[in-house]
Image: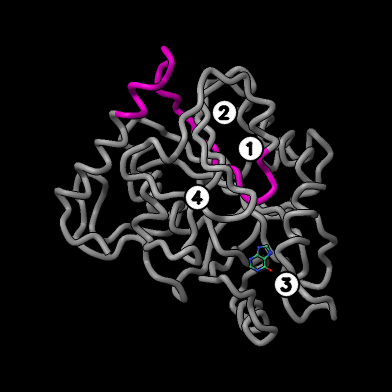
Amino acid sequence: MITNAADYLKKVDGACDHIRQNLGGCEVPKICIVLGSGLGPLADLCDESGEIDYSDIPGFPASTAPGHAGKLIIGELSGKLVFMMKGRFHYYEGYEPEDIAFYVRVMGRLGVKTLVLTNAAGGIGEDFVPPEFISIEDHISFLAAPALRGPNIDEFGPRFPDQSYVYDREYLDIMAGCADKLGIKIRRGVYAYTKGPQYETPAEIRALRSLGAICVGMSTVPEAVVASHMGMRVAALSCVTNMAAGITAAKLSGEEVIEVAGQASESMCSLVSEFVKAL
Ligand code: HPA
């Protein structure tokens, strides 16, 4: 938990300074795209101007999750200057929510206005055929540690932020239009955020289904909450890589998630590129 707001703000500003000094002559992009498990290939579509190792950015945590390279890319995608986060931070790695969302605060302070989050998720509902895509329209996060706990930093946003529109409504429509144009099936729905690293039990999945979730995963929500707290507009795209626990007899594995995310990455890359073009 943040205990000293002034120190945390100083840490955020230190990271901002380092990034500003290493933009390779580019302006600060207005869009930041976060690449989830197995979705790193999107960075190959980016006309790269520079990259910064997370380990060189003061205050940035180290990225330890499989498939998360730990690099911030600066370049053009679909003719727009973007940041790409190749790797993010998760609660299950041992990070506190304010560390998980640290980079979002850095992006917000730098002047990024749009955060595009991608992730791999388990599908809740018998009619999923992985890989499939979901545009997240809302989430359930009260089972996990809240990212905004601790003293509020008024420079970022209000103490009690409204959560009615964490995911930008217009972006949901734009994403649906892009998927339609590309002939990619996409659903809209509620993402349930779990702490991990263990997958959910079948009983937990039944509970989440009865609460209205259509997919489940271990990322995205702390970042989305912190971004919307700062007034950033958020789009979030899940790739359903597996049926959630208990829906079929199959056992869940991290290897399968990475493999199926890899199979979907071409479509995911097209969808995100098209979305960025439409912004
Ligand atoms: N549960 C949680 N996180 C996930 C899953 C899942 O089934 N699949 C991919 N990430």
- The answer to whether residue 237 is seen in the rendering is no
Query: Which quarter of the rendered image does ligand 1 occupy?
Result: bottom right
Q: Is mark 2 within 8 Å of ligand 1?
A: no
Q: Which mark is residue 279?
A: 2
First of labels 3, 1 by sequence position: 1
**Left or right: 24 in relation to 255:** left
Residue 174 circle label: 1
Reading the chain from its start, which is encountered first: label 1 or label 2? 1
Residue 129: x, y in percent? Answer: 85, 61
Q: Give the residue at mark 4.
A: 63
Q: Secondary structure at mark 4?
A: loop
User: Quick one: quadrant of the N terminus?
Assistant: bottom left
Between the C-alphas of marks 4 and 1, the distance is 31 Å
Q: Which mark is residue 275?
A: none
Q: Quadrant of the C terminus?
A: top right
Q: Earlier in the sequence, mark 3 or mark 4?
A: 4
Q: Amino acid at mark 1?
A: Ile
Q: Pinpoint residue 74: horizontal percent, then vertical percent.
A: 51, 25
First to last magenta residue range: 18-40
Whether residue 110 is in magenta: the answer is no
> What whole-number distance in Å separates the C-alpha atoms at marks 2 and 3?
32 Å
- CB under 8 Å between discs 2 and 4: no
Judge whether 72 appears above or below 240 on screen.
above
Q: Say above or below: 23 vs 262.
A: above
Q: Tell me the amino acid under the disc marked 3.
A: Ala
Going from N to C along the chain, the mark reached first, 4 or 1, is: 4
In terms of sequence position, does the residue under pointer 2 or pointer 4 come before the other? 4
Q: What label sits on residue 244 in the rendered view? A: 3
The reply to whether the C-beta atoms of the residues labelled 3 and 4 are less than 8 Å apart is: no
Q: Residue at x 34, y 57 (%)?
A: 98
